[in-house]
Amino acid sequence: MSEAPEPHEAPEPHEAPEPPEVPPSRWSLAGEGTHGYGARFAELVAGGEDVDGEARLADAVAPRGARILDAGAGMGRVTAALRARGHVVTGIEPDRTLVAQSERTYPGIGLLPLDILETTPEVLEAHGRATAYELVVAVGNVFILLAEGTEQRALTMLRGLLAPGGRMLIGFHLSSGPAGSRSYPPEEFQRDVEAAGLVVDLQAGSYELHPANAEYAVWLLSVAASPGGDHSAGGA
């Protein structure tokens, strides 16, 4: 069986279907509060600073050469780090400024300018990308910067992109989050996880797996078993 092409070497895309309506995210509504994020991380990368903490954990929980979706990829640092570790990664990022920054920092990275809420298997197929993933990553406060009231919907959308046996890695601040972000208590997040047909396999306090705390939460999720014991997710 031949290996899947790297995302930036994808075949000619098909015509993309009409995307669903996406409400403005907390990130987009924060305005000037988000300015400088991409440039700051670009400076850290250029200076040789370690910005791979999330990617190291993602690499550890994924099979070798995994198909990984980096949801809310920002300026591409996690996508780039996981590709360097041998994974086939698709990065999606709705902020066009960050998508442009990603190309300056990681030429040819090819992030798709998509919101989680418009990322369906049909849309991914139209872009020549995988439609099911062994791991979905949404780190760096993605879930506390989504549009108001869409957290459960986003979890459900991402669940539909998991390959059988696939998992999700999600991380966000519980306190002192970035400008425009919401407070997302662990018990509320867990209710949304269950409503989306997922279960919490692990909760930690950092990407180095420190104990759970009141400042930051890292979650490893998988698809809940059906009454018959089936853990099926999205496509094969």
Image: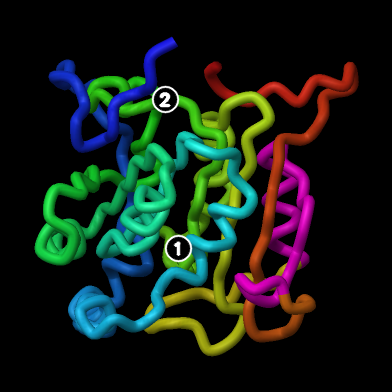
- Find residue 99 and report its image quarter: bottom left
Cα–Cα span, label 2 and label 1: 21 Å
- Image point 27% across, 66% down: which residue? 28
Towards the viewer: 167 or 53: 53
- Image point 55% across, 71% down: which residue? 172
**Which dot, 2 or 1, sits closer to the camera?**
2
Label 2 sits on residue = 131
Type of the residue with mark 2: Thr
Type of the residue with mark 1: Val
Please determine whether, in this image, residue 49 is positioned above or below residue 53.
below
Q: In the rendered view, does 81 fall on the left or right side of 168?
A: left
Q: Are marks 2 and 1 in contact (CB under 8 Å)?
A: no
Towards the viewer: 119 or 43: 43
Please determine whether, in this image, residue 66 is positioned above or below residue 128.
below
* Image quadrant occupied by the C terminus: top right
**Residue 101 x, y percent position in the rendering:** 14, 65
Is residue 146 among what the camera can see? yes
Q: What colouring does the structure picture have?
A: rainbow
Towards the viewer: 175 or 63: 63
Q: Residues within 10 Å of mark 1 (few under 14, many from 20)?
A: many
Q: In the rendered view, does 169 fall on the left or right side of 212?
A: left
Q: Mark 1 falls on what kind of element?
A: helix
Magenta residue span: 187-209
Label 1 sits on residue = 142
**Magenta includes 216?**
no
- Image point 53% across, 18% down: which residue? 235
- Find residue 77 and report its image quarter: bottom left
Q: Mark 2 falls on what kind of element?
A: loop
**Residue 212 x, y percent position in the rendering:** 77, 76
* Image quadrant occupied by the N terminus: top left
**Residue 68 x, y percent position in the rendering:** 46, 41
Please determine whether, in this image, residue 108 is positioned above or below residue 53.
above
